[in-house]
Each structure stands twice: as structure tokens, then as C-alpha cells.
Amino acid sequence: MNNQGSLDAVAAEVHGLRLVLAQSPVPHFTLMAEGAVSLPSVREALRALEDARRANPTLDTLVIDSLDVSRFGRGAVVEIARWIPRNGAGLERVVLVSTSAQLRSSVHALAACARSVRVESVETREDALALLGAPTLSLTG
């Protein structure tokens, strides 16, 4: 995929979920969720994310934006949370933008199994952009 000349390019779109390769403020993947999100659509979007990661192996940041979700279907929250430790190799950072306590706690609990991935939660897109643009400190001391 050629992203030259544009800030964002849509990599995939399935019912309720859109995967975007974003270039600003730093290059990253964004998984945008909206409306009623079902387990089958989450699985399709995560497969598209895996394909996009193979095509762009240097991108190490994922933003999961679920502010516009009206409801998660049965299993959708857990599937998103389980994806991080199962398929998060190569990711250094996941920024979760959500007001859903269930999604936030599930992602943090299951991401603890992927020690190399730093998970940060915010409640606004502005806070997510600020986190992405902030310099990161090495935790290896």
C-alpha cells in the first residue's frame, strides 16, 4: 500500500470496524470501532490488522478507538483483549481510547501477559494524540 501524499489510508473496513494506517503524529495503526460491534466483525478486522502488520512491519503502535461504539456483542471485548498477547509480537505500544470500563479492564488484564507491550488508556481522542506525540522513555534502565 502506498501512503505517500496522504495522512491516512484505509487498510480495511468491516461492519462497525475500520482499520486505518495513520501517519500523524507518528505512524501507527488505528482500529476504529463504531455502532454495534459483533464478534465476527472483530475477528475480520483483527485478521486485516495482522495482514497490514505484515505489510508494514516497522509500525509498532496500535490505537484502538471505541468511543463511537453503542454496544459490543458477546465475545467482542474479550476477542480484542486476547489479540494483544496472542498476536502483539512486534508491537511496543497500544493506546486504548474508550469510556467502557469493561473493555479497559479486559485489555489491561490480558495485555499483562504480553510484557513487551505497553498499554495506555485514555478517554478522549485528544489525549490519545497527546500520548502518541509525547516522547517515550525507555523502561530498561
Image: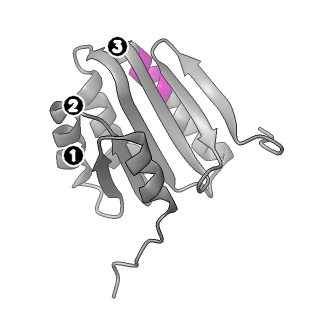
Evaluate whether residue 90 shows in this view: no
Picture coordinates of residue 95, whole percent (x, y): 38, 49
What's drawn in magenta, residue-wise? 41-46
Q: CA distance from mark 2 to mark 1?
A: 16 Å
Furthest residue in direction bottom, as rendered: 141
Residue 111 location (% of width, % of height) = 26, 50
Front residue of 99/83: it is: 99
Query: Is 33 included in the stretch rendered in magenta?
Result: no
Q: Is residue 24 above or below residue 137?
A: above
Check disc 2 and report the residue beneath it: 100
Which type of secondary structure does the marked residue at label 3 adopt?
loop
**Residue plotted at (82% across, 45% down):** 4
Q: Which mark is residue 38?
A: 3
Q: Residues within 10 Å of mark 1 (few under 14, many from 20)?
A: some
**For the residue carrying disc 3, how many other residues have a C-alpha within 10 Å: few (<14), some (14-19), or many (20+)?**
some
Hey, what amino acid is under mark 3?
Ser
Amino acid found under the numbered disc labelled 2:
Ser
> Residue 110's mark?
1
Q: Which residue lies most toward the front here?
A: 126
- Is 43 a magenta residue? yes
**As shown in the figure, which amino acid type bears the numbered disc 1?**
Leu
